[in-house]
Image: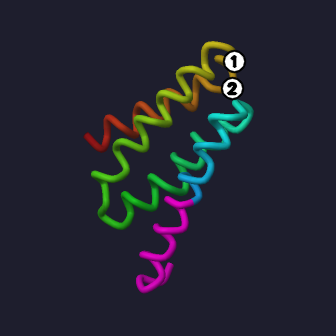
Amino acid sequence: GKPELQPKAIDLTVKAIDNLRPLAARNPTYRPQLADWIMSPASALLVATCQKPRAIPLIQEAIDIYAALNQSDPVTYGPKLTQARQRLAELQ
């Protein structure tokens, strides 16, 4: 994308996650979407714009969500959990 639009894109992405958190807390069916949004576009965008320190706690949050989801559906969430853990390891 255009460099001049990156700050706005980051702001909108982080706000979307902030808005999704309370919804996911009230209704667990939104937890997968929260974790997915954290992994992409949020963490990917933060890393791409040299904001890795902001991405790391978000990825840890996604790992926590995927780990809980994996307990009831390992076929769906096991690969996502593995991918999130690998991404965190790459960034640390």
- Gap in Å between the C-alphas at discs 2 and 1? 6 Å
Q: Position of residue 91 (x, y in %)?
A: 30, 44
Q: Position of residue 43 (x, y in %)?
A: 45, 52
Question: Magenta span has 13?
Answer: yes
Instruction: Inspect the image, locate mark 1, and give the three-letter code of the amino acid beneath it.
Output: Asp
On screen, residue 9 above or below 32: below
Pointer 1: what residue?
73
Q: Quadrant of the C terminus?
A: top left
Asked whether the residues under the numbered discs 2 and 1 touch, taking CB atoms below 8 Å apart as contact, a structural biologist would say yes
On screen, residue 4 above or below 44: below
Instruction: Inspect the image, locate mark 2, and give the three-letter code of the amino acid beneath it.
Output: Thr
The residue drawn where x is 63% and y is 26% is 77
The residue drawn where x is 62% and y is 48% is 20
On screen, residue 11 above or below 2: above
Pointer 2: what residue?
76
Q: Position of residue 68 (x, y in %)?
A: 57, 20
Is 30 displayed left or right of 21 in the figure?
Answer: right
The residue drawn where x is 40% and y is 35% is 60
Q: Position of residue 83 (x, y in %)?
A: 49, 34
Q: Nearer the viewer, residue 53 or 30?
A: 30
Q: Which secondary structure, mark 1?
A: loop
Q: Nearer the viewer, residue 44 or 20?
A: 20
State the predominant SS element of the stretch in magenta. helix
Q: How is the image coloured?
A: rainbow
Q: Give the residues in magenta.
A: 1-15
Q: Nearer the viewer, residue 33 or 77?
A: 33
